């Protein structure tokens, strides 16, 4: 988009200072993001973002959730006497014409503006020390939101519902739009998926039986959704579009899926894929430190299951997109989504080989 069109959008918001530059920021696969600089030294830098409303059909709900979450966290940080709060929680800018509204719609596209957090970095990989910190941060995020006074909406329906994701895969198999279903590699993957179906839908069954609560979760706890300061300390959690009520397994499991894999989720070298137990141990210790006060025994006991569930779910989702013609995740070559799916299956098998060790470790942490 042209600079002057973007600038006109920014100027719909109640900003401080005058815009003097807009440039693409980051490499998100879902939303489009720009960094907006201002001429005056004392005025902040901003982040302009176009929300992908194919993925998030109810942008109004997304922004209502985000407003509730950020203001609740800000209040908690103030009550705790924290310093530097502006770097610890995102601040969204309202419209000039409506101080209650945090987004605008221009030519059918949805836009929002937030303050850019200064002197902060994101990471693509973590070491045990930053994983421990990340565990504490996500546990704390859930803890701070435990008493949020409003009920949050489900911004993507059934987002982490394993039964639903398997159903989606079965529909894609029935349609077989790309004629990929009978590739031997796909058939092999489907056998692996089928063998674990019942076990992996345990969370939904427990939810129905009333033995597993839904809590406000982040639901996209990838490593790169956290800002760190230059001393490697977590400042805040970002990318709040998927914040919604879910099983705590979402935040615990999805972090380990990305943080504890020895390689990236689309690395084609399957021999290198594996689950890093040092990251698992550090993250689990950090997470339990801040979350043990509210977790139920059933939640704690099933954390190793959550570590398996998320590679499995992502394996199913990538295979679904592969069968459907690569419509959801941008792919760089024809087999990309299959490779991603296979990578996640290998990660799952590695997680499974550590199951008992993980259970013992979680039990040990709880005794401390
Ligand atoms: C998407 O947008 P991003 O890259 O943070 C996806 C996650 C997947 C991830 C896999 C809304 O996350 O659920 O785990 O890709 N988010 C949505 O890379 O579908
Ligand atoms: Mg993201």
Image: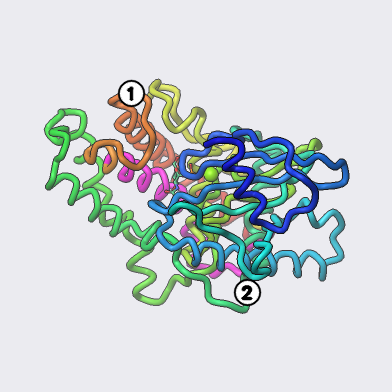
Q: Residues within 10 Å of mark 1 (few under 14, many from 20)?
A: few
Is residue 11 a member of the stretch shown in magenta?
no
Q: What stretch is highlighted in magenta?
A: 290-319
Residue 74 position (above or below residue 172): below
Horizontal side, residue 177 vs residue 298: left or right: left
Q: In which quarter of the image is ligand 1?
A: top left
Residue that appears at 69% across and 44% down: 227
Nearer to the camera, 96 or 301: 96
Q: Residue tagged by mark 1?
A: 333
The span from disc 2 to disc 1 (Cα, nearest Å) is: 44 Å
Horizontal side, residue 161 vs residue 16: left or right: left
Look at the numbered disc 2 and give the secondary structure of its residue: loop
Nearer to the camera, 116 or 185: 116
Determine if residue 239 is in view.
Answer: yes
Nearer to the camera, 353 or 267: 267
Q: Residue 141 carries which label?
A: none
């Amino acid at each position: 988009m042209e600079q002057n069109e973007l600038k006109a959008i920014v100027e719909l918001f109640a900003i401080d200072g005058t815009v003097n530059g807009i440039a693409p920021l980051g490499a998100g696969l879902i939303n489009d993001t720009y960094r907006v600089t201002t001429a005056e030294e004392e005025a902040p830098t901003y982040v302009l973002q176009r929300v992908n409303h194919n993925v998030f059909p109810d942008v109004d709900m997304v922004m209502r959730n985000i407003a509730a979450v950020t203001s609740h966290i800000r209040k908690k940080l103030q009550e705790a006497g924290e310093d530097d709060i502006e770097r610890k929680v995102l601040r969204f800018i309202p419209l000039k014409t409506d101080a209650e509204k945090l987004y605008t719609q221009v030519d059918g596209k949805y836009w929002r503006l937030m303050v850019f957090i200064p002197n902060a970095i994101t990471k693509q990989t973590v070491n045990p020390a930053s994983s421990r910190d990340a565990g504490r941060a996500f546990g704390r995020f859930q803890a701070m939101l435990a008493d949020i006074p409003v009920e949050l909406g489900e911004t993507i329906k059934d987002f982490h519902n394993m039964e639903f994701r398997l159903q989606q895969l079965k529909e894609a198999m029935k349609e077989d739009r790309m004629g990929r279903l009978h590739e031997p590699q796909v058939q092999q993957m489907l056998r692996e998926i089928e063998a674990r179906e019942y076990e992996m839908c345990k969370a939904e069954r427990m939810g129905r039986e009333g033995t597993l609560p839904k809590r406000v979760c982040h639901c996209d706890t990838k490593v790169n959704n956290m800002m760190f300061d230059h001393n490697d300390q977590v400042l805040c959690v970002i990318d709040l579009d998927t914040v919604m009520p879910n099983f705590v397994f979402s935040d615990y499991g999805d972090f380990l899926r990305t943080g504890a894999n020895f390689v990236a989720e689309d690395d084609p070298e399957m021999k290198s894929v594996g689950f890093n137990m040092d990251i698992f141990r550090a993250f689990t210790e950090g997470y339990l430190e801040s979350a043990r006060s509210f977790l139920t025994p059933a939640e704690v006991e099933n954390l190793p299951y959550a570590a398996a569930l998320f590679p499995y779910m992502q394996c199913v989702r990538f295979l679904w997109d592969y069968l459907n013609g690569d419509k959801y995740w941008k792919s760089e070559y024809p087999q990309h989504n299959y490779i991603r799916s296979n990578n996640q299956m290998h990660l799952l098998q590695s997680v499974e080989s550590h199951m008992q060790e993980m259970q013992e470790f979680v039990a040990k942490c709880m005794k401390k």
